[in-house]
Image (cartoon, rainbow, N blue to C red):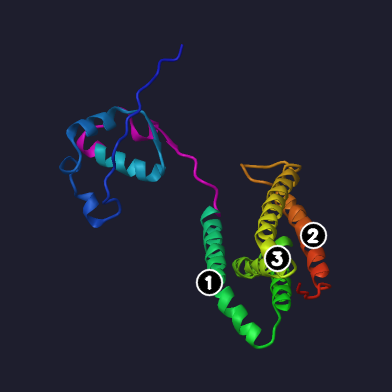
């Protein structure tokens, strides 16, 4: 039967690597009880083994370690996979671009209307630009990924113009129903597509908690084909009013 142990949380100093660290006395910042406990521990779990060894050398200068430093069992905590910080940055700037485009859509569409650009034409241009920005993303291009993500997020806001185009096709009393029905179709389709992408990704074996890049290329390729077909169909549309 395994005897449960005790987990000790040992604080470290903040002066590591400074000129004062070599001559500083740990007893000035850490209680004697902490130093005594640290000196007798044989197993350590830390973020950085090098930093922990440097700390234990300083402890040993005050309270001799119960075991030689080389004999201590020092384990590092698992580190998150590299690339998550970059992914977070890409998502942040994509969201920022979407918000900025949301604020600019009204003024830009007004300027376009004053210059004779019909709402349908403006909508078509926005959706074609969105499709074009998605092409390198779907193909897994490694050149300027942030640029294409920002462009894709910014131009995708043009999809909201479809609401105003649809309400022009029905009597004013039915515009609320049309908008509601459009929302139901939009969210229902979005959920179905997201589920479908997950189902496709699941067909490839993952590694270290990540999906296979080939699975992403295949799934995004399907999305690109669907978006390209929708864009081609959109070009055949003609503006009509009730």
Query: Which of the pair 241/144 is nearer the observer?
Result: 241
Q: Residue at the location (68% across, 48% down)?
A: 191
Inspect the magenta stretch and tell me whether residue 61 lies in it: yes
Q: Residue at the location (57% across, 75% down)?
A: 106
Query: What residue is disc 2 on?
Result: 226
Query: What residue is disc 3 on?
Result: 134
Foreground mark, 1 or 2?
1
Quadrant for residue 44, please give it.
Answer: top left
- The tag on residue 213 is none
The magenta region covers: 60-83
Left or right: residue 39 versus residue 229 is left
Left or right: residue 30 versus residue 212 is left
Above or below: residue 81 compared with residue 158: above
Query: What residue is disc 1 on?
Result: 103
Rendered location of residue 23, percent (x, y): 19, 50
Q: Residue at the location (56% across, 61% down)?
A: 90
Question: Badge 2 local density, few (<14 within 10 Å), some, or many (20+)?
Answer: few
């Amino acid at each position: 039967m395994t005897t449960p142990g005790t987990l000790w949380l040992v604080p470290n100093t903040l002066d590591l690597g400074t000129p004062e660290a070599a001559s500083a006395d740990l007893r000035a910042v850490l209680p004697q009880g902490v130093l005594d406990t640290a000196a007798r521990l044989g197993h350590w779990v830390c973020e950085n083994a090098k930093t922990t060894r440097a700390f234990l050398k300083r402890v040993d200068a005050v309270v001799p370690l119960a075991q030689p430093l080389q004999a201590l069992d020092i384990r590092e905590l698992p580190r998150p996979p590299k690339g998550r910080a970059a992914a977070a940055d890409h998502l942040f700037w994509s969201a920022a671009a979407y918000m900025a485009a949301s604020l600019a859509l009204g003024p830009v569409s007004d300027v376009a209307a004053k210059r004779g650009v019909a709402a349908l034409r403006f909508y078509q241009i926005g959706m074609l630009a969105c499709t074009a920005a998605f092409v390198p993303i779907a193909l897994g291009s490694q050149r300027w990924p942030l640029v294409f993500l920002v462009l894709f997020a910014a131009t995708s806001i043009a999809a909201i113009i479809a609401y105003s185009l649809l309400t022009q096709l029905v009597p004013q009393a039915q515009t609320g129903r049309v908008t509601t029905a459009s929302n139901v179709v939009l969210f229902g389709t979005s959920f179905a597509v997201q589920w479908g992408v997950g189902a496709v990704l699941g067909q490839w074996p993952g590694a270290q908690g990540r999906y296979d890049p080939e699975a992403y290329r295949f799934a995004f390729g399907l999305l690109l084909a669907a978006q390209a077909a929708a864009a081609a169909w959109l070009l055949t549309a003609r503006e009509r009013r009730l």
